[in-house]
Amino acid sequence: MKQLPFLLVLVLFFAACQEDSKQTSTTPPPVATKKIPIPKFDREAAYNYVAKQVEFGPRVPNTPAHKATKEWLSSQLKTNGATVIEQDFVATAYTGEKLNSTNIIGQYNPKAKKRIVLAAHWDSRHITDNDPDATKQNLPVDAADDGASGVGVLLEISKHLATLPDYMGVDIVLFDAEDYGDPKPGNSYSWALGSQYWARNLHVSGYKPKYGILLDMVGAKNPRFRKDDTSMKYAPEIVNKVWKLAKEMGHSNYFTDEIVTGILDDHFMVNSIAGIKMIDIINTPNNTSPVFVKHWHTTNDNMENINKRTLGAVGQVLLAVIFNEAMGKF
């Protein structure tokens, strides 16, 4: 993801949006007649999922680590009960390089009309261009937080989705080629290549989930999840519901009502291209640019900066969203 200048954000916000696809059915899905228990999120397991991704090495497209991680992610989703689609595509990077990429989609109750989508990006940035040591700025990023943390949370959540009633569907979408963007300003669409492709080539014809939630950099200690202006533009009602629920669960120290501006992330592409409402849970602890964590796009984005308590808080909030949605209470 990238932080954008304010004026550029305004330009992007007024980009043309794709027309909403028509619903295939107007019949409302059934509502649970009894309480469905909300599972307990295992933060230790989520942490191990993050560590496993980092063990492969930087997941930069066109590398052996990227290929091995793709196979492992698909396997884990299948093990956890998903119907998996590997959406292969070739993206052109700002450098002109062709990136062999794959969006990985895990479907739960794929026939259900009522659906939500959960997303994160699984690739690593190819350069540590924000590293304070200039001699290290051409190294790839381990991406423990900026990528692997969100994926780790979603993999742990995926263990529980097979227990949902059959009228409630969830899709997990792991975007590729998110972080191969141009470090120079002004080339915004060089970022989030996987979500751009998915938004233009949805894995199901007429796909129209109720809403989506994107996770990005959700692993650091003492996070500050502010409401970003893209999420508030396209889906303020979803943002406010999620933040309210998080506070009711005792996480008001993490989920704050402050607004942060200038965030370009996968959710912008999903909202503006596909017309699917998607919000972003992203750690933006700083008031000055860059607003992201200090280890963002540096060699320090490693397991030392992954906090189990943060993973647990985000994961438990998402499970509460999903299962309350299944009960018609969200």
Image (tube, rainbow, N blue to C red):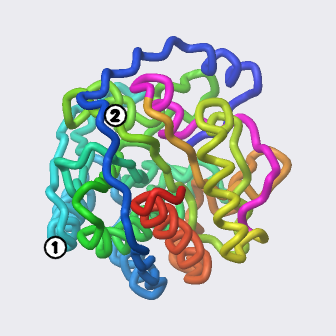
Which picture quadrant has residue 327?
bottom left
Q: Earlier in the sequence, mark 1 or mark 2?
A: 1
- The image position of residue 302, as x and y in percent, is 52, 72
Compared with 330, 161 (above or below) is: below
Compared with 228, 37 (above or below) is: below
- The image position of residue 69, as x and y in percent, is 25, 63
Label 1 residue SS: helix
Q: Amino acid at mark 2?
A: Lys
Task: Give whichever of 326, 48 is nearer the camera.
Answer: 326
Q: Is residue 56 visible?
A: no
Judge from the rendering whether residue 285 lies leftward or rightward of residue 1; answer left or right.
right
Alpha-carbon span between mark 1 and mark 2: 26 Å
Q: Is residue 159 visible?
A: yes
For the point 50% across and 40% down, the residue is 278
Label 2 residue SS: loop
Compared with 296, 233 (above or below) is: above
The residue carrying pointer 1 sits among few (fewer than 14), some (14 to 19) or many (20 or more) residues within 10 Å by Cα, namely few
Q: Amino acid at mark 1?
A: Thr
Closer mark to the observer between disc 1 and disc 2: 2
Judge from the rendering whether residue 263 lies leftward or rightward of residue 83; answer left or right.
right
Q: Which segment is the magenta one?
A: 254-275
- Work out which quarter of the rendered image holds the N terminus and state it: top right
- Work out which quarter of the rendered image holds the C terminus and state it: bottom right
Residue at the disc numbered 2: 208
For the point 49% across and 30% down, the residue is 271
Residue at the disc numbered 1: 79
